[in-house]
Structures are given as structure tokens and as C-alpha cells.
Image (cartoon, rainbow, N blue to C red):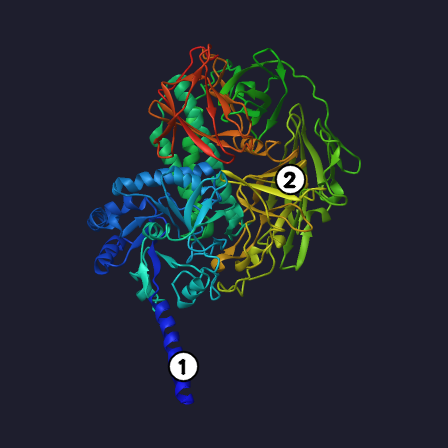
Amino acid sequence: MKNNNLYSKFIILVVLVLGAFSLQAQQKTWFVDGYHGGVYGHYPEWQAKFMVEKLTANPDWKICLEIEPETWDTVSVHDAENFKALQEYYSTTGRFGGIEFVNPTWAQPYCYNVSGESNIRQFKYGMAKIREYFPEATFTTYSVEEPCFTSSLPQILKGFGFKYAVLRNPNTCWGGYTSAFGKDLVNWIGPDGTSMPAVPRYECEGLSTINCYATNSNANSEEFIAACFADGIKYPVGMTFQDAGWAHGPWLGNAIKEYYKPSIYTTWTEYIDMVKDEVEATDWAFRLEDVKPGLVWGSQVLQKLAQEVRVGENRVVMAEKMASLDYLYTGKAWPDAEFAEAWRTLMLAQHHDCWIVPYNGRPGNTWADKVTRWTGSSNRIADEKIARLFSEVEGNDAKYIRVFNTLGNIRTDRVSVELPGSMKLKGMVVIDQHGKELPSQCTADNDGQLMLQFEATVPGMGYCTYVVKEKKSKTSPVSAQQLSDGNVIIETEYYTALIDSKRGGTITSLVDKKNDNRQLVEKGKELNDLRGYFYRESKFHDGSDTPAKVSIMEDGGMFTRIKVENKLAGNSYYQVITFNKHNPRIDFELHIDWDGQPGIGAYDQSNNYKAEVRAKAFYNDNYKLHLQFPLQGLGEKLLKNGPFDVCESELDNTLYSSWDSIKHNVVLNWVDIEDASKAYGVALFTDHTTSYLQTEELPLGLTVQYVGRALWGRNYRVHGPTHMHYALLPHAGDWEAAGVEVASNEWNEPLTGSFVKSDSNPLKRSLLEYDDANIHVSSVTMDGGDMLVRFYSTSSVDKQHEVIWNCTADKMEQVDLNGKKISDVQANKASNGEMTTKLSLPQFGFQTIKLTNVKMRKDDQ
């Protein structure tokens, strides 16, 4: 009897165990399949036919499409019959659940590495192009194969009508990934407070242990699903976007043979619609540092293309603003088609493949080569539109200079104007409207062109006109002095600085005279020093180890310019340091002439690079050539800007050396280090997206050069001189109080001036003004006779901001990014004809105002 009881208990236990396994086996899971690519990346002509055939043969299969929208222009011509079949399938069947468009951006940019305005245009132009070929297309869920994320996407996505997002890229993590967080769903909260439901990379979703490009959700493995159930995830979902051209059809069952069953194919919108009311979403204040990108920062090819993209972004946005003013002032037609082309080529230069595989392609037609051509085209169009605002100079009659300000705040800044040939040998002064002589200085640019530089004060979004008179200008006080030992002392209104020739021509003392004579350089250290590890010599080299030649290039009424010439590991380089006499910003230009191919980085991987090995030399910035900024008493706080965001860093340091420990060490426009009380700081501006350094020993550094093996074993070489610009801005208070974002905008959108003929136009005009310098005009464009002005706020002041408009309009509305009305904007008209409106914006929020039938006031002089 006892044995029988034991046998019965054993049978019951077996039944219970088998029942538990059976119950778990019956639990459903989901999988999202799809295709990624396009005509610039990868898209074979047979792809359209292949998708229709496979969808028809597998009625339970569903796909998400992340195809470059411009692809359809090509396919509709070269594969017209099969593309028409795809259009018909989508219209009759696919749009009801079988096919979903999930990333309509024009060129699938990484998002974090370009401007907020660029991200908006990527969606705007991309969605419009898709709807040309698929008029019924809807855009509900944002999902990507690459790490194409940035913190401000919720407000951009919602502005275009998206409802959901997916915060993972499980099968293409070569260039990075997001933080692991949460379970089934999160509420993705952007820096402005906008929230939207999103599927995260689960907290239990680890990185692959067998490769360096995947997370564990890329194939719905039994291990992954078991981990999900164990962590309390109720509706596990995996994901892979196949590259267009892969001939697997349904991923699970074809490419992947072993996977959890049942796994049900779904689209992202269908999945989120199903689970959003069944689970409790966790709030996630997703930060810039939750994007972890691992690109080859410091490689010359990436540095150059990032500089080209930055110039293009600045020029096209400035040209749009100035063309809007041209429309208002002169009635010249808005060049819509030309700006669309300028944005098309600029957006292509922002394609993620440009940044992660810049060498791919035939010689002369690599991604990097294309970026040069694309941005060159964008800049030519922008420059043509800017030039329209300036009349031609005739003979010796040129005596007026018109200066435009494309920012919304009134500003006093240096403007540089090319001198006509007739004036090259004449002394001259610049006079403002009140007859006051302005500080000025003649100088030659890098091409030898003689330039007149002077200090102009220009109202927001407008211009001011100045007169040039032939007269010997006043002698400016000397600010720089060369000592007998070769050192140079600079004395300006803002600083007393010492440039030490014996220590590599570095700044060994920098005293801020406006802030209690604060010494900024750590004792015994060197500011703007170059340091890097040359692995063939197994040695660090510092610029400060070698004496330098220091000379005074210019010392005039506008600035003092010092040139430092030196060598680093046998390579000649120079830095030009400019101390502005009417601006606290200190500008730097760095140029390195390489002798051969140096090896710069943590170690040599020329013969032992393995893609699947997590540790890579190119990850470790500490060994790359970098600029050092040992700033005394600073570094407790570090802030950095991103697209429509400013993030206070939570990193102890930025260093990492392997794929599984990537940190967000990216500087878009600036980083700012402050003391613990945020009473004082120094901002570092850069002319391109790159990485910055923050370590226990070094509060701030800027990556300059890496040379060696990197992604896919490609040899990242130098292809000529390294040339870059950066700037330092010491300031009292925190970044907001000091207007660091304002100063960055001024650095990126300089005053633009040219000689003009005397005419009857008002000498001074302004489109708008506002009461807080931390409100910014992100863009101004025309749509027929209507003007669209987008404001962006970095102001934490909780109030309605007043905007004064020096124009008239039939009505004003707030519109979303699709141009649809959100609400009326009440405009109050003053007795002088000005309109005033109130602007309510959260910090890091943006808002678009539409002015219908806009015109300048008749008395706006």
C-alpha cells in the first residue's frame, strides 16, 4: 500500500509538471518581421515582387517596412509592373494589417547626431514621398533596424500623428543600442514632457553573447521567451527587420529554425493596440544617455563628413530664414522646389550608412564621397538664396553694408564682409545709423581674400545697414605682448592669458577678469594641449612636451589672434587662438599635417581584428588623440545638448572599451562643465558631432583623431590634414542663465553681411522679438502666402513669453508638424501696428505658428 501511495504521488507530480510545461507551451508570443533598406542602401529590383509573392503564399505573415522613401521613385520606373502589384496589394490587403510603414524618414538618420530641425524635415519629406505612391499610407508606430533614436522623438512623432514607438533595434546593434528598461510597455517621456506608449528593449533582454550586433529578442529563442515569462512579461514580442535583398521570406521557420512556438506574426501597431490596455506601462523619462552609440569617433573620414553635414544644416536653415525675409521685403517668390532639393541632398548626407560604413562603395563613390557631393549641392542652393538679398556692387559706389541676423534675439557680434576690389587699398571705418564709429579690423581669410570685420548690432530676424567711409581708423590698444622667452601674454576686457612656448604653446594661465579674476587652468596643467597614444611606438605623445613657436598674427580693434606652431610625434600642427575683444568666447582652429600613416589608439588591431570579439581599440577615447581642458574647480556637473534637448550627465566618466559597455559620450554642438553649485562653468563648442572625454583625471576633453582598424575590420586612415574648429565660453551661472544655447546658435548661424547699393529700403528691419533669450527660432519657411515660424525653448521660466511681430497677418494659428490646426493664436495689435502674442512652451518644447497672408508693416522702419 505504501508503495502504491508513493507511485500515485509520483504520477500526480508528473502530471502537474507536464501540465505546467503544457500550459507554458500554450502561452502565445509574438514576432515582428519586416524589411529595412532602400535604393541608397540595398534594395534589389526583385524585392517588390518577392514581398507580394511571399505575403500571398503565407497569409499569416505580416511585415513592417523601413524603406527609404526615395526608393519608390526608382522602383516605379525600373520595376514598374511588380511595383504596381505591390501598390495594389497594399491598397486592397496590406494596409488592413499585413503591411505597416514604420520609419518614413527620408534617409533613416541616427537622429541623435543631427539637429532637431533636421529630424523634423526627415519625417516631413519622407512621409510626403511615401504618400505619393501609397496614398492610403498611415504612420502610427515608429520602429527602426538601426539605433535611430534620440530623446526628443516623442514630441516630433506626436507632432506628425504617430501614436506609438519601439525602443529597440535587436538585430543591428553594430552602431549601438538603447538602455534595457521595463517590461511589456513603457510610457516614453521626452525632455519636454511629451509621453507615448513604447515597446522597450526589455530589462531582461540582454546583449548577444555570440556576436556584437544583436540583442536576445532577434529570433524569439526559447531561452529569450523563458526569460521574459520569468520576469513577468505577459506578452513577449521579438523583432527582426531583414535587409532588403534577403530571400528568406518569413524570418521564423526559414532563416531561424529553432524558436519558441507558438510565435505569432504581427505588426507593431497591431501588437501595441492589443496589449496597451492589458498591461500597466512604466513611465520612462528616456534621456540622451539612454542612446548608446558606438561609432568610430575621431576617425578622419567621420570627422570630415560630420563637419560637412553641420555646415549644410546651418546654411540651409539660414537660407530659408533669409528667403522668408526676402519674400516679405521684396516679394521674391519662395523657392520651394529648390529648398526641397537642398534638403533632399542634406538628408541623404545624414543617412546612417554614411556614418557607420563611410568607406563602403567604389573608390570615388563611397558614402563619404557622396556626402561631399550631397552637402556641396545643398550649400550651393543655400548660398544662391542668401545672395539674392544683396544687390550687386557697382564700381566705386559701394559704401553700404547690410547685415542679416537669422536668430530671433537682438545680437551684437562680429560680422565679416568681403571687400570689393576697389577698396582693398583704402583706409575705412564703419558707421552705424547714429553716426557712431564701430570697432573694425581688416584681415585676410585662409584663401588670402581681404575681409572687413566689424561689430554689428542687428535686431531679431532682420537686418541693419551700415555706412563705410574712407578714413583712417582709430588706433586700437595693443592686447598681446611677446616676451623675450617666446611666451605671449594677452590682456583683453575679459581675460588675462599666458601662452607658454616652452610647454607646446598651450594656455597655462587663463584668468576671467569679469568673474573675480578666477584662474581657470589647473595648476601645473596645460589648456588646449594635444595628447594621444601612438601604438607603434607604445607611447603617449603630448604637444606640451615640445617647445613651440608662438607668434602674434593680428591685434586689432575686434580681436587678437595668436598662432602656435609645433610638432607631435613628428607631425607638424598649428593652432590659431582668437581672443575676441567684444565677446567672451575664445575661438580655436586646429590643423595637423600628417607625415605618413600614424597608428593612434589603444592598441594595434591590424592583424587580429575579430568582429565577434567585444573589446575593440576604437572604443577607447582615452588613447585617441584628444584636446585636453583641465579646468580648475569644474567638472562636478556636465551638461550636453542634443536635438531639442539639454541633458545633465549621470556618467562618472565616459570611457569604455568594449561593445557591451557603450556609454553616451557624444557631443552634438556643445558640452558645459560646471562647479557643484552651478555658479560657474565653461562651455566647449565643436564644429561637428563627435565624442568628448570625461574621466577622473580629466574633467573635459575633445576627441580629435583615431587611426587603425575599426568596424568590420576596415582600416580608418588619415586622408590628408586634420582641420577643425572649436571654442570655449567661460561663464557665470549655469548653462541656461549664461545663454550657452544662444551662444551656440550664434556660433553656428553667424551674422551675414555684404556690400549693397544705396536704395530706398529701410535701413533697419526686424520680423519679430521676444522677451527671453532662451527662446529660439528653429526655422522660418513660407507656404504660399503663409509663414510658418517654429519656436524652441530652453527656458525653464514657467510663464507665457511675449512675441512682438513687426508684420501683419489675417490670422495666426498653432499647427502641428503636418500643418493641421491645433488652436487659434490670439494676436493683440498695438497702436503702431505691431502684433503681440503669448507663447506657452515647456522647457525643450517646440511650437509652430502659422501666419496667414503675412505682410510687413508699412511703417516698420
Total residue callouts: 2
The dot on residue 575 is 2
Q: Are marks 2 and 1 in contact (CB under 8 Å)?
A: no
Name the residue: 64% across, 43% down.
Answer: 637
Dot placed on the residue nearer the N-terminal end, 2 or 1: 1
Q: Residue 77, how many percent across, how many down?
A: 24, 45
In space, the residues marked 2 and 1 are separated at their CA atoms by 84 Å
Residue that label 1 marks: 9
Residue, far front: 1
Badge 2 marks a residue whose secondary structure is: strand
Viewer can see residue 384: no
Residue type, mark 1 in image: Lys
The nearer-to-camera label among 2 and 1 is 1
- Which of these two is toward me, 774 or 409? 774
Name the residue: 41% across, 49% down.
Answer: 198
Q: Which class describes the residues within 10 Å of circle 2: few (<14), some (14-19), or many (20+)?
A: many
